[in-house]
Amino acid sequence: MVALIGSLVAFVVALLVGGLAIYVGASLIVGIEDYSHAVVTAIVGALAWALTAWIPLFGLFLALLAWIWVINWRYPGGWLDAALIGVVAWLAALAILFVLDTILGLGVGAFGVPGA
C-alpha cells in the first residue's frame, strides 16, 4: 500500500511539474496564464505521445508531432507558436527538475513534457 501511495504522489508531482512547464511556455509565447489548462494539456499530450511513440521507425517523430499538435489544438496561434511553447516548456521542465532534484532530492520527471 505504501508503494502505491508513493507512486501516486510521484505521478501527481510529475504532472504538476509538466503542467507548470507548459504553463511557463504558454504564458511566455502566447500570453495564456491558466495553470489548469496547462495541466490538462500535459495529460492529453502525454496520451498522444504514448499512442504514437511505439510505432516503428518514425514513432518518436510522430509522437513529437502529436505532442505539438495537442499544444496547437489547446492554445491559440499556429504550429510555430505550438513548437515554441513546447521548446520553452521543455527548457522550463529541465530547470524545474534540476531545482527539485538538487534542493529537495526528488527524483521525479515532468509528465506531459517529452524528454524531461
Image (spheres, rainbow, N blue to C red):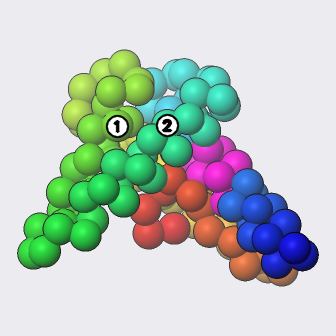
Specify whether 110 is left or right of 48: right
Q: Earlier in the sequence, mark 1 or mark 2?
A: 2
x 52%, y 22%: residue: 31
Which one is nearer the viewer's eye here, 35 or 66?
Answer: 66
When the figure is inspected, residue 102 is found, relative to residue 59, above or below; the finding is: below
Q: Residue 92: x, y in percent? A: 58, 55
Question: Residue 63, located in which quarter of the rendered image?
Answer: bottom left
Could you classify mark 1 by the number of other residues whose Cα lies within 10 Å: few (under 14), some (14-19), or many (20 or more)? many
Q: Nearer the viewer, residue 7 or 90?
A: 7
Residue underneath mark 1 = 70
Left or right: where 28 falls relative to 60: right
Q: What residue span does the magenta drawing correspond to? A: 14-21
List the single residue furthest toward the front.
1
Q: SS of the residue at dot 2?
A: helix
Please report the residue visible at 18 percent of the width from the left and 57 percent of the height from the top: 62
Q: Is residue 36 left or right of residue 56?
A: right
Question: Which residue is the site of mark 2?
Answer: 41
Q: Quadrant of residue 53?
A: bottom left
Q: Is residue 2 on the magenta stretch?
A: no
Give the prevailing secondary structure in the magenta stretch: helix
Q: Estimate the spatial distance between the alpha carbons at disc 1 and disc 2, rounded to whole Å.
A: 7 Å
- Spot occupied by residue 86 in the image (x, y as percentages of width and height): 40, 47
Label 2: few (<14), some or many (≥20) within 10 Å? many
Say what amino acid the circle numbered 2 marks.
Answer: Thr
Give me the disc on residue 101: none
